[in-house]
Amino acid sequence: MSSPVHGFTDDALGTLDAVGVAAALRAGEVSRAEVLAAAVARTRRVDPSLDAVQLSCFDRASTMPETAGVFAGVPAFVKDNTDIAGLPSCHGSAAFTPRPATATGGPGAQFLHSGVVVIGKSTLPEFGLTASTEFTDRAPTRNPWNPEYSAGASSGGSAALVAAGVVPIAHANDGGGSIRIPAAANGLVGLKPTRNRLLDQPGARQLPVHLVTEGVLTRSVRDTAHYLAAVEQFGANPKLAPIGLVEGPSARRLRIGLITEDVLGRPVHPDNAAVLSSAATILAGLGHEVVAMRLDVEPRFIEDFKRYWAVMAAAMTLSFRLGHRDHFDPSKLDPFTKGLIGLAARNPLGAAAAAWRLRSGTATYDKHFAEVDVLLTPVLSHPAPRIGELAPGQPFDALFTKLVDYVGFTPLNNVGGGPAVSLPHGLLPHGLPGSIQLAGRRGDERTLLDLAYQLEASSPFPRIVDRTAAEGAA
């Protein structure tokens, strides 16, 4: 088993989360320069092993003016599919010729509104279309808990950097599980908000089915709660009740639906099942009523999502060709993206029918909460795979079959529009963290955060530094 790779040390960042770093800055216990220097040193120490940084901008960060906000002065990375003025966005693809963005987009501005200082951009697989941050033209992004394994995707670079202690918080987004999958693989908190809760990437709300939402990856529930409370005011959606700041657990007791099988009725890997059972036992012990449920979703949902995913790949490629022209070379797209584009082209009427059926996904999602407050599910159907198992260069059909077998529980929330959070829980073999998912009614992030605080307090999240210490003692 490979040893963990992390940057935690006795510097200005220590083992603090983002709330802790911001508090230390406000109190004058550390300076902004010290905090940035610590993050830069950690990046240089661990990234040669993890390959999670797409672009660093250390000098730029050190000369940026003082920031305001809940995380004022806290160093962070932004995912490289999000525009920040002056930094290129290459969307994980060799097809782009890097050139600086002329303006900061809505999601980027929203992230900066929290006060973070961007020190670089994190890796993602091409266009964020798959579940492992791997490439055909360069080294993969590795999992800091065990570098022989995948860091997940598509926010894999952000997840690896937060888990490794380089920064306490990083930007992420989620169109089929891309916040929750890497959170699960790397032992982090990853909350996908309700659809339209936060600002979206350009054109997202005009798509036939709006799947992608913005968020962050963190090591604590309170970081995620403070982030959402701060940035929901930035372009707030008046159709959704504000989340507000959830500062800890309440005494409310809930009815929780326990889901143990995927859409096709297949059980998950025994290791993932054991983690899920442990979380259910703890929640029941706290006084919640946990009842067995099944996902009430037509099996064709998988094929419909696959076809719509292919349409999105084709649409993004066309958009980039039109928007970047001489700076975008589609011949350099990876085989998986080309396979998706080919799938969309082979049956456009089938893709249109799939999109039409997926538009009913909100009603399908909502009916799961007729008799329960929250769903408790796995995030993934089996532990994170070894590097190479989901590499984009393999035959398209073989890779897509593997993805379906891996990502069994996250896409429904994207189609249905409801919030869901991945939480660390326990440890798996090979030194990887376990995880579970809590899903809630549309607009009800407060209940998820409440329950997440309870689980965090009752079963503290695994920490990579603890695993390192245990290996050293052994």
Image (spheres, rainbow, N blue to C red):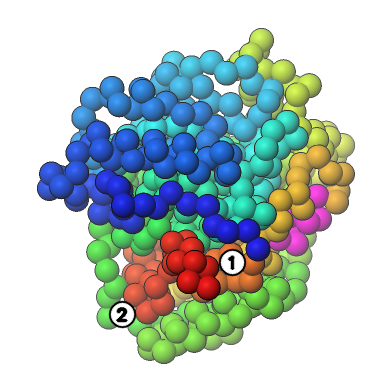
Q: Secondary structure at mark 2?
A: loop
Q: Amino acid at mark 1?
A: Gly
Q: Residue at x 54, y 57 (%)?
A: 4
Q: Which residues are magenta?
A: 399-406
Q: Quadrant of residue 138?
A: top right
Frontmost residue, 40 versus 265? 40
Q: Is residue 313 left or right of residue 81?
A: right
Q: Which residue is mark 2?
A: 252
Three-letter code for the amino acid on which mark 2 is drawn: Arg
Q: Which mark is residue 431?
A: 1
- Density class for disc 1 (Cα within 10 Å; few <14, some 14-19, many ≥20) is some
Check the image and report above or below for 187 versus 279.
above
Residue 356 appears in the figure: no
Taking the spot 57% from the left edge, 44% from the top edge, the residue there is: 50
Looking at this view, name the residue that lies furthest to the left. Answer: 27
| Left or right of residue 279, residue 198 in this image | left
